[in-house]
Image (cartoon, grey):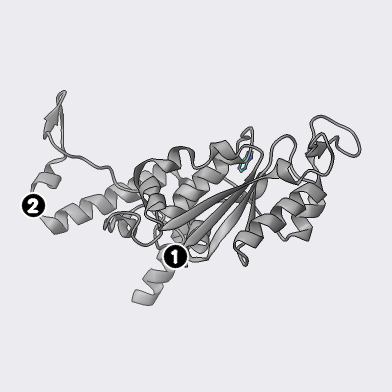
Amino acid sequence: MTWHATALTLFPEMFPGSLGLSLAGRALREGRWRLDTVQIRDFAVDKHRTVDDTPCGGGAGMVLRPDVVDAACEAALAQGPGRPLVYLTPRGRLLDQALVRELATGPGAVLVCGRYEGLDQRVIEARGMREVSVGDYVLSGGEPAALLMLDACVRLLPGVMGGVDSAEEESFSASEAPLLEYPHYTKPAEWLGRTVPEVLLSGHHAAVARWRREQAEAATRERRPDLWARREPQRIAAAGLAS
Ligand code: ADE
């Protein structure tokens, strides 16, 4: 079965956006994945096509009505049942490679994109939506977050990343406590007085592997102490098993 994404949105024109270009776009045209949109406004119940209302209890902004969003969810699931509903919100669990992998290996996803102050809590609960955030910052809507999530999922689908096995080596691959990637270099060997590290030109594969490992560890320690700290218990456990 083709991996199937449906974006539930007030701005369907935002899809596939930049995902229509590059490898993901080619894969989409080749039918390696499918993308649909559902216009939330099509499920409004009044003649003004109202989708939102003022927050109960007062305060700024508007809240998307649960009945309208629920009907839109129903329509999305009719196109492909059994898919998880993912609501993009800064209140959600942080997106990481483990969740990307889980979604990419499933049947697809319905991506619910909020605007304004967000969705009425009751439809989130009634539909069992998984709330997902793409980072600790606030976007003007869920659409760019959905596109970002789609990009991360689609590149893992079979046949999308043209035979590249760098997926294995790169940051955040198999391990739950990954290392950041080592730095990359290509020709020319000297550019603006900056040289490619000698070892990478040596042809000594073991030395290259060792250097890359050291660089990856140093980068992780310095830039992402949170990831590095998650590694420590693993390293200690591994050392204990080895002795
Ligand atoms: N909508 C607005 N901000 C968001 C974020 N950081 N992640 C996911 N959805 C969002």
Label 1 neighbour load within 10 Å: few <14, some 14-19, many 20+:
few
- Residue 203 at what x, y percent from top left? 8, 52
In-front residue for pair 131/5? 5
Q: How many marks?
A: 2
In-front residue for pair 96/83? 83
In-front residue for pair 39/112? 39
114 vs 152, left or right, is right
Q: Label 1 CB, ligand 1: below 8 Å? A: no
- Residue 191 at what x, y percent from top left? 15, 27
Q: Can residue 228 be seen in the rendering of this structure? A: no
Q: Dot 2 lies on which element?
A: loop
Image quarter (top left, top right, bottom left or bottom right) of the C terminus? bottom left
Residue for point 62% across, 37% down: 11
46 vs 142, left or right, is right
**What number is the disc on residue 203?**
2
Q: Which residue is mark 1?
A: 234
Q: Ligand 1 sits in which quadrant?
A: top right
223 vs 49, left or right, is left
Q: Taking 239 as reference, is 5 above or below it?
A: above
- Residue 154 at what x, y percent from top left? 44, 54
Residue for point 74% across, 59% down: 127
1 or 2: mark nearer the eye: 2
Q: Taking 3 as reference, is 208 above or below it?
A: above
Quarter occupied by residue 41 = top right
Q: Dot 1 lies on which element?
A: helix
Q: Can residue 181 be seen in the rendering of this structure? A: yes
Q: Taking 117 as reference, is 108 above or below it?
A: below
Tag 1: amino acid: Gln
Q: Earlier in the sequence, mark 1 or mark 2?
A: 2
Tag 2: amino acid: Gly
Residue for point 38% across, 40% down: 21
